[in-house]
Image: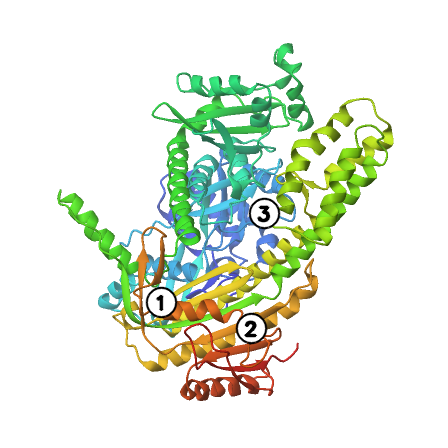
């Protein structure tokens, strides 16, 4: 393989000046002008001792060795009079190796830095190989395939701004030959290849690696198209302002630097919220965009003035351009918020309102620490992509609303993905009827003959913990008030007496309304009294104690809440963690068979699954699916218990959970209740299932005071021996995996109201 390419290619490459020397030979023997003949003859004579120039070579060191001779040889192609204007060089065909530069090209590379390597932009190995094959089709087979693949060089200037140059290539001095390894494709094969331009393997089959010879050199000319490329990149980047794509294009500011030719530039964009009459940031770009000018502008005015300014923009949306901040009026410089500009070293800026149909959509800003970076000409350049900004913002608003609707459906209703098809069918019928000006009554959504799966992981003794922590909070609050009133001699006796009465109630004979009465006393009498003490002359010690007291008061209830908050935080964390495990594993369960799934958070997590043929009528359904889902459920509940054990030590308040699975063999129906926006069991017969579920939580072992659920164990409640055998098989599998222990308990559940004959298995989890 030739060492001239970094990528694989269908040909070997040799640098050769043969075709150009042939041109000189033609001038030598055919030109009528004597000086031209003498010139050509002189060049031929100078190169005759260097046969490699004609025969071809691959050692790029020879380019340096013969640098002066090559410059002299190519003088006609590189006129001295144009060397400071044209960006031009000779090159090895389709490679990054260039030589014989014009002075302007040399200066561009010098400014880029000594470590800069020139490379083609945005072409991968497969694309490069196919392009080389297309070159063979054009050059050797004379196929007019009109390949217009654009090539670019990206070269930074001395200020660090990335400049973009489009490359035009003159291949007059190259020639292609097949080797003995080459296959000559027929016209039918060529047509097939051109129809499969992206099939790299197919092209390589018909044009094997290095099976052709490419000799010669090319002349490349560069045209500075920085504005055009930057404009294209800007359009692509602006389109990507998308709520679903949380990977913002952090190169946007760099693109603007190239487009405006400003080395130090910051860009900001804020959307206008018409409802609130305010500007708001794009969350996904919060760390990319700056909003210094907009912050300055917003803070320079009061709320009424800002709203009037927004209203005025609908009539006069002229952009603001300040080339040099130092030349602003002194009145503006004296505004306090002007420090925003000084603190952020802003000395030139543009602020551009984005309007549509005379309504404000957004405001953009461009800032620079260098004075005179922006002017009217720079503002004029924005007109070329204003429409794209409008499109992008409109698309963002549309996608944002779409995503908000999706969040509402996901978080606030129970229309699960597995059943949404039935809602969609009804909605489509309603929509089609409305188009035809017909009346259509939406039908009830229901699913019949489903097998239910139910389970919960309950936080044990949460009500008792909450009560005890409430007592701790209120006793601490009363103690704190005692400390304050002991320092205040006047008017405090009645409050001390009332607090003593409440303290006695809390710790001896608490009543249903004790907390509410204490809350009313604090809100209506004690707290106004203490706040009055802060406003009049009082000792520093008293004021400090009162301030410390109020820092512990939960403003919404006027009560101390720290201990109960720790419990609430712990329960929230447990619920979130358990729900995450359940939701993550539910994705795998849907792959077994689509089914309706819902979960609820309270003091723990409760989940329901309903499966059956009616959920997905187009798929094959059998009893085997129920067994697979039951095994998945048991395994997932075990996983929830294991994960809980791993993070329970980090909870603010120590908690335990107890998990239960209820096995029910009868088929039930579910119906979507429009008033509650959720599914529920349908019919009186099916309500028996719901009654059992509600009574299992506090159920005991028969003839015992011990509850059937126990922390660190899984309880499985069922009716018959068939279910027992089924679940013993699941347990055996999980025991082999080291998840469950061998201490299986066979229990009878106490008779519940209207429910008898329930059995239970209980087994411990292996401690991690």
Dot 1 crowding, Cα within 10 Å, few <14, some 14–19, many 20+: some
Query: Relative to residue 500, is residue 630 drawn left or right?
Result: left
Of helix, strand and loop, which one carries label 3?
helix
Q: Nearer the viewer, residue 606 or 266?
A: 606
Q: Which one is earlier in the sequence, the residue at label 2 or at label 1?
A: 2
The label nearer to you, 2 versus 3, is 2
* Residue at the image point whose x is 45% and y is 25% from the top: 353
Could you tell me if residue 179 is visible in this image?
Answer: no
**Which residue bears the numbered disc 1?**
687
Tell me which numbered mark, 3 or 1, is placed earlier along the sequence.
3
User: Residue at the spot x=38%, y=58% of the render?
Assistant: 131
Residue at the image point whose x is 48% and y is 41% from the top? 165
How was the colour assigned to the protein in this rendering? rainbow
Q: Is residue 295 above or below residue 713?
A: above
Q: Which residue is mark 2?
A: 639
Instruction: State how far apart marks 2 and 1 are (Cα).
Output: 30 Å
Residue 68 is tagged as: 3
Quadrant of the drawing holding the C terminus: bottom right
- Residue 516 as seen in the image, left or right of residue 579: right
**Residue 588, quarter of picture:** bottom left
Foreground disc of the pair 2, 1: 1
Q: Nearer the viewer, mark 3 or mark 1?
A: 1
Q: Position of residue 564 (x, y in %)?
A: 66, 52
Residue 223's image quarter? top left
């Amino acid at each position: 393989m030739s060492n001239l390419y970094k990528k694989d290619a269908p040909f070997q490459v040799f640098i050769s000046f043969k075709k150009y020397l042939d041109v000189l030979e033609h001038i030598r023997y055919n030109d009528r002008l004597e000086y031209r003949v003498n010139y050509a003859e002189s060049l031929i004579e100078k190169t005759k001792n260097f046969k490699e120039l004609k025969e071809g070579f691959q050692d790029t060191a020879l380019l340096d060795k013969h640098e002066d001779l090559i410059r002299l040889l190519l003088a006609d192609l590189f006129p001295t009079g144009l060397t400071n204007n044209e960006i031009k060089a000779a090159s090895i065909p389709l490679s990054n190796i260039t030589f014989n530069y014009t002075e302007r090209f040399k200066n561009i590379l010098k400014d880029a830095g000594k470590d800069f390597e020139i490379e083609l932009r945005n072409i991968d190995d497969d694309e490069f190989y196919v392009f080389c094959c297309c070159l063979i089709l054009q050059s050797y087979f004379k196929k007019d395939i009109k390949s217009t693949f654009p090539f670019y060089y990206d070269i930074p200037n001395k200020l660090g701004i990335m400049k973009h140059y489009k490359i035009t290539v003159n291949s007059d001095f190259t020639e292609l030959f097949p080797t003995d390894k080459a296959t000559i494709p027929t016209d039918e094969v060529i047509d097939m290849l051109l129809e499969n331009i992206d099939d790299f393997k197919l092209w390589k089959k018909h044009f094997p690696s290095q099976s052709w010879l490419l000799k010669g050199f090319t002349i490349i000319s560069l045209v500075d198209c920085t504005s055009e490329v930057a404009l294209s990149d800007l359009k692509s980047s602006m389109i990507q302002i998308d709520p679903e794509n949380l990977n913002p294009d952090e190169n946007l500011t760099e693109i603007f630097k190239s487009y405006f030719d400003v080395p130090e530039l910051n860009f900001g964009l804020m959307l206008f919220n018409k409802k609130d009459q305010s500007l708001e940031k794009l969350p996904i770009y919060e760390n990319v965009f700056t909003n210094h000018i907009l912050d300055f502008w917003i803070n320079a005015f009061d709320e009424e003035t800002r709203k009037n300014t927004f209203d005025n923009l609908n009539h006069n949306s002229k952009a603001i351009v300040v080339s040099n901040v130092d030349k602003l009026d002194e009145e503006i410089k004296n505004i306090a918020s002007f420090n925003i500009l000084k603190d952020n070293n802003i000395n030139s800026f543009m602020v551009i309102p984005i309007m549509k149909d005379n309504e404000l959509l957004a405001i953009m800003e461009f800032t620079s620490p260098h004075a005179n970076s922006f002017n009217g000409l720079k503002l004029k350049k924005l007109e070329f992509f204003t429409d794209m900004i409008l499109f992008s913002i409109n698309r963002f608003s549309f996608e944002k609303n779409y995503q908000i609707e999706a969040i509402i459906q996901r978080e606030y209703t129970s229309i699960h993905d597995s059943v949404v098809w039935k809602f969609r069918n009804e909605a489509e019928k309603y929509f089609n009827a409305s188009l035809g000006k017909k009346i259509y009554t939406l039908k009830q959504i229901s699913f019949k003959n489903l097998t239910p799966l139910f389970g919960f992981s309950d936080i044990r003794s949460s009500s008792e913990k909450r009560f005890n922590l409430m007592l701790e909070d209120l006793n601490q609050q009363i103690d704190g008030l005692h400390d304050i009133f002991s320092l205040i001699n006047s008017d405090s006796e009645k409050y001390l007496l009332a607090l003593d009465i409440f303290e006695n109630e809390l710790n001896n004979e608490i009543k249903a309304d004790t907390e509410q009465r204490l809350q009313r006393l604090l809100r209506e009498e004690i707290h106004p009294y203490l706040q009055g003490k802060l406003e009049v002359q009082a000792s520093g010690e008293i004021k400090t104690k009162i301030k410390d007291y109020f820092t512990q008061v939960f403003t919404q209830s006027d009560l101390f809440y720290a201990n109960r908050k720790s419990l609430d935080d712990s329960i929230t964390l447990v619920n979130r963690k358990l729900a995450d495990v359940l939701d993550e594993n539910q994705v795998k369960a849907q792959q077994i068979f689509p089914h309706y799934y819902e979960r609820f958070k309270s003091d723990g997590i409760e989940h329901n699954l309903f499966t059956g043929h009616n959920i997905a009528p187009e798929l094959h359904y059998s009893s085997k699916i129920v067994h697979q889902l039951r095994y998945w459920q048991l395994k997932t509940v075990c996983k929830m218990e294991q994960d809980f054990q791993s993070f329970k030590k980090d909870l603010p308040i120590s908690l335990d959970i107890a998990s239960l699975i209820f096995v029910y063999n009868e088929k039930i129906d579910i119906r979507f209740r429009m008033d509650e926006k959720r599914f529920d069991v349908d019919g009186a017969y099916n309500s028996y299932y719901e009654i059992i579920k509600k009574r299992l939580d506090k159920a005991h072992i028969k003839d015992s005071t011990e509850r059937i659920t126990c922390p660190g164990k899984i309880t499985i409640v069922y009716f018959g021996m068939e279910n027992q055998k089924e679940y013993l098989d699941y347990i055996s599998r999980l025991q082999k995996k080291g998840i469950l222990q061998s201490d299986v308990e066979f229990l009878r559940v106490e008779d519940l109201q209207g429910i008898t004959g329930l059995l239970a298995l209980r087994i411990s989890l292996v401690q991690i």
